[in-house]
Amino acid sequence: MQLPDRLVVGLDLDPLRCSITSGSRAAAETALWLARVQGSAHVTLVHSVVKDEYYDPLVDELVPVCDTVEPAARLAVSELVARFRAHGVGCETVDSSERPSVALAREVTAQRAQLALVGKHDGHETDATRLGPIALRILRESPCPVWSVVPGRAIAPRRVLAATDLTPTGQIAVEWAGRIALAAGAELHVAHVHPPSLHSRGGRGSAHLAQLASLSIAHLGESARAAAHVHLREGAPARELLSLCEELEVDLLALGAFSHRRDEPTQVGSTAERIVTRCGAGLLLVRAR
């Protein structure tokens, strides 16, 4: 698995300052870093001009209310595009009259993008666990993995944690975390949380734990496996993972969005929902291939 070469960034403009919000700029800078590390990537900046919605009983649906982009804000976007191109990264902008999550999902599909990036919030929040409503909707609805970036922090993560339940989706999260950690020169941590009953059955204690640890990092390359720190925890997955994030002071948590409901396998699972709204780190939410 290689780093993505087609990226889509959700761009939000501050109407009062006619500038790019801190969250969006952090997402764009992260995309630029990934593109430069990858070597031959293309980035699409998607901006929704929808500012509000109202319910129209005649058509029985929400109707978007669009706004215009001020020249100063347009200039800020042009300067950002120029920054990408100055580093040899192909970049384009797309304005959309659809709500942000729909616009981004449509562009992901059109560009066959492998990763979407958004700001975790607009940069005015003092609480890093705060996830903006647009970012949350994109995390839930994007057809590809989404990296929600915390503004105000270093672009390249220092510690990356992957959470795996040993399902295919969980292993994809480990693969993503391994690639990003390698690109950033970061510490890689892999966590698996299991109920106590898994190792309390007679004669399966240490051997079973060793097997879980081995399976947790089985999809990493040899060097990454040797360097990875494996954490096995007992208890409720969301609680244990959030606790581990705080203990390790991780910059990025990668986890699967897998739902165990057979009728809605593409929906975000309950564990992921609990984590994404309470975690102070950046979030990388992946889906099954």
Image (cartoon, rainbow, N blue to C red):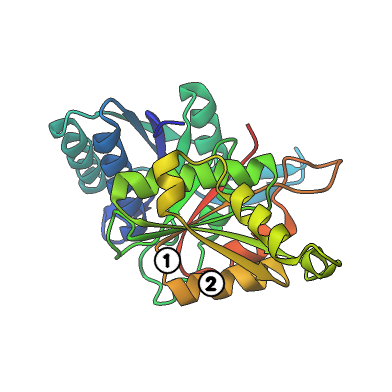
Return the residue nearer the eye: 74 or 247.
Answer: 247
Is 213 displayed left or right of 71 in the figure?
right
The reply to whether residue 11 is visible in this rendering is no
What kind of residue is marked 2? Leu
Instruction: Say which element carries label 2.
Output: helix
| Residue occupying the far front of the picture | 203
Residue 94 position by quadrant: top left
Density class for disc 1 (Cα within 10 Å; few <14, some 14-19, many ≥20) is many
Asked if disc 2 and disc 1 are in contact, CB closer than 8 Å, the reply is: yes
Which residue is painted at 34% across and 45% down in the image? 182
Figure check: 202 above or below 286: below
Where residue 213 sits: x, y (%)?
A: 61, 56
| Disc 2 target residue | 244
Instruction: Say which element carries label 1.
Output: loop
Q: Earlier in the sequence, mark 2 or mark 1?
A: 2
Which residue is painted at 50% across and 22% down in the image? 110
Where residue 206 sits: x, y (%)?
A: 69, 65
Where residue 209 sits: x, y (%)?
A: 68, 61
Where residue 88 sits: x, y (%)?
A: 17, 28
Density class for disc 2 (Cα within 10 Å; few <14, some 14-19, many ≥20) is some
Which residue is painted at 55% across and 36% down in the image? 144
| Residue occupying the far left of the picture | 86
Figure check: 82 above or below 205: above
| Disc 1 target residue | 250
